Structure formats: structure tokens, C-alpha cells
């Protein structure tokens, strides 16, 4: 077996063992490393809508379809999906089984770390679309393997974890995904400014949205903010907030067993009929039917 193939197999084995032991009901296995998680899914599933933070998701086994706008990406083992902006995606795990589950390794990008590294090594400003797919970089894979080996050793993670995360971000910035990632670290760029507004919406999505406050957070006029927000996320601020509310309501119902009305009120809706209409429009199924399908195993939560 070649050294490259051995490294791939080693990482897969580490991810498989950790995910098998720690995956929750939705298939997500969180780790003690900030932003690092794994996904384990046993069956192909229904379409799922999400607004992900900037991240890199690498498929290690199985297949997944991810659609943004008119573009669809078919991801298989070794494919690394970069989402470099808070954009809505529709995804579906297309190949998974009890004998050969779908496994993926997820790293949420640290924007401050990206900016610091880009400035330290003098990288040029980046550009590119919000989603791209490349083969998993061998340098990133090497760091990920070393990081995975320390997950059950809290002392090693506390001492070495930040350094390994920094090294992983360095190789991603230097690799094939680099130009798209670098735009996240460009000081005072439109991407950075809009990310501040997005963080505010995420923190207060259940509250009444005031566009002037979001524009102020981004340091833009209201008209400029609307233009750049839609360019970065493909949505208006109000549409973005609405999708966040509906996605969080669905998570509460599916993962926590919340009643439909309780989930609707918790995310800021004042009318259950309005919630039901907008939920059905986004997910293509009513909340009640979605719950029934999930309970009998014909639907399920699928993280990015």
C-alpha cells in the first residue's frame, strides 16, 4: 500500500471509530476541538436545507449532492467542499448504508485565524464563488490525521490543538481552495463586513430585524448593504433571517421533540398558520407530515 493511500486509510479509520462512538441522533459527532466535527449517516435521505457558516467538508465514504442556486455538486470519497460564505444550500446524502455509512469530516473556518495567517505571510487578496469542490489536500489530510489521533487525549489537545488548527488553516490557504478562503481574511473587505451583519442575525434571529442596525454593523449605507448582502449570501437580510428561523424550528422539532407550535413561537413566529405556510414553502412538506415521516424513518436530519 502506498504511503498516500495508507494516510487516507488511517484518517478514515480514526474518523470512523470516533463518529461511531460519539455521533448523536442527527448523525453529528462533536469533538473537543473548536469547529471540528464528523458526520455519520446510515441511510440515503431526503433533501435538507441549511445555511452553513464558512467551512470545509470532506467526504470519506458514501456520496452527497449539494446544490446552491443552479449549481449541483456530486461529492464522493476524497472530495472537499468549501463553503466560503453564509449561503443557503440544499443537500442530500445519496449513498449510505448500515454496512458502509456515509462519513464526513467538517471544519468550520476561523475567520480571525485566516486573516492573521494571510497577513503574516503576505498572501494576495482572494476571490471566487461561495462554493467550490477540490480533492482533499494531502497536507491538510496529514494535519487532520494528527489532530484526530489526539482527540481522546485532553492534555495533548489543550497544548497542541490550537497549533494544529492553525497549521490546517495555513495549508488550506496555500492550497487549491486558497483564493476563495483568502477573501474571508481580507481586512475590511465586503466579505468581512457582511460577515459581521450575518453574525448579528444569527445571534438575534428570533428578534425583529432592523436593517439599519445590520447596515451599521457592516459599516455600509442601507442601499450598499442590501446589494452586498445579496451578492454574498444570495438572499435579502429578511429572507436570510426567515430561513434561519425555519431551519432552527425544524431542528427543535426533529432533534429535541418540540411541538410544532412551541418550535414556531421559540424562533420568533407569532402565528402558527404563517409558520406552517413558510415551512411548507421552504421544505416542500408541512411540519406535521415532516415529523411523521421522520418518526417512521423515511426522513432524517443530514448535516453538511
Image (cartoon, rainbow, N blue to C red):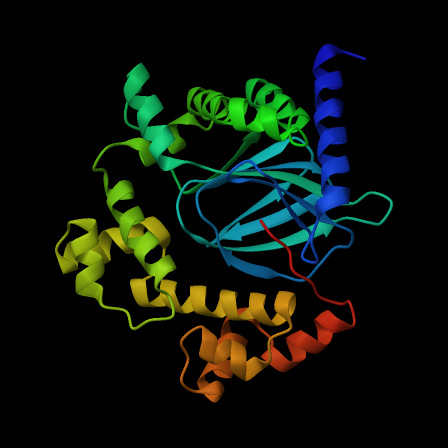
Judging depth in this view, the residue of 216 and 257 nearest the camera is 257
Judging depth in this view, the residue of 178 and 159 nearest the camera is 159
Question: Eyeballing the image, is 237 above or below 121?
Answer: below
Which percent across, then down, holds residue 151?
Answer: 65, 31
Which percent across, then down, holds residue 71?
Answer: 50, 49
Which percent across, then down, holds residue 68?
Answer: 48, 52
Q: Viewed as shown, does residue 157 lie left or right of 222?
A: right
Image point (42%, 40%), residue name: 84
Direction left: furthest residue? 221
Total marks shown come to 0
Q: Viewed as shown, does residue 220 lie left or right of 279?
A: left
Which percent across, then down, holds residue 166?
Answer: 45, 24
Image point (71%, 51%), residue name: 94
Q: Quadrant of residue 79?
A: top right
Judging depth in this view, the residue of 24 and 45 nearest the camera is 24
Q: Viewed as shown, does residue 136 lie left or right of 223?
A: right
Amino acid at each position: 500500500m502506498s504511503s498516500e493511500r495508507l494516510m487516507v486509510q488511517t484518517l478514515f479509520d480514526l474518523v470512523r471509530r470516533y463518529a461511531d462512538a460519539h455521533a448523536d441522533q442527527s448523525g453529528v459527532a462533536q469533538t473537543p476541538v473548536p469547529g471540528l466535527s464528523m458526520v455519520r449517516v446510515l441511510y440515503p435521505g431526503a433533501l435538507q436545507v441549511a445555511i452553513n457558516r464558512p467551512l470545509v467538508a470532506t467526504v470519506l465514504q458514501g456520496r452527497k449532492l449539494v446544490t446552491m442556486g443552479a449549481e449541483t455538486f456530486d461529492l464522493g470519497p476524497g472530495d472537499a467542499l468549501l463553503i466560503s460564505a453564509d449561503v443557503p444550500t440544499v443537500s442530500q446524502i445519496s449513498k449510505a448504508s448500515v454496512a458502509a455509512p456515509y462519513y464526513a469530516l467538517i471544519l468550520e473556518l476561523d475567520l480571525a485565524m485566516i486573516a492573521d495567517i494571510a497577513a503574516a505571510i503576505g498572501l494576495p487578496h482572494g476571490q471566487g464563488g461561495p462554493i467550490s469542490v477540490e480533492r482533499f489536500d494531502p497536507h491538510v489530510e496529514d494535519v487532520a490525521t494528527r489532530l484526530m489521533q489526539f482527540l481522546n487525549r485532553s492534555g495533548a489537545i489543550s497544548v497542541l490543538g490550537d497549533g494544529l488548527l492553525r497549521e490546517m488553516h495555513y495549508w488550506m490557504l496555500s492550497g487549491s481552495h486558497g483564493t476563495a478562503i483568502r477573501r474571508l481574511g481580507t481586512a475590511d473587505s465586503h466579505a468581512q463586513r457582511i460577515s459581521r451583519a450575518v453574525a448579528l442575525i444569527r445571534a438575534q434571529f428570533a428578534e425583529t430585524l432592523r436593517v439599519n442596525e445590520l447596515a451599521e454593523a457592516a459599516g455600509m449605507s442601507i442601499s450598499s448593504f442590501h446589494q452586498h448582502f445579496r451578492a454574498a449570501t444570495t438572499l435579502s437580510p429578511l429572507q436570510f433571517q426567515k430561513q434561519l428561523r425555519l431551519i432552527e424550528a425544524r431542528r427543535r422539532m426533529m432533534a429535541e421533540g418540540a411541538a410544532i407550535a412551541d418550535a414556531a413561537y421559540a424562533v420568533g413566529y407569532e402565528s402558527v398558520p404563517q409558520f406552517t405556510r413558510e415551512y411548507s414553502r421552504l421544505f416542500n412538506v408541512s411540519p406535521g407530515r415532516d415529523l411523521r415521516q421522520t418518526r417512521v424513518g423515511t426522513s432524517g436530519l443530514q448535516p453538511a
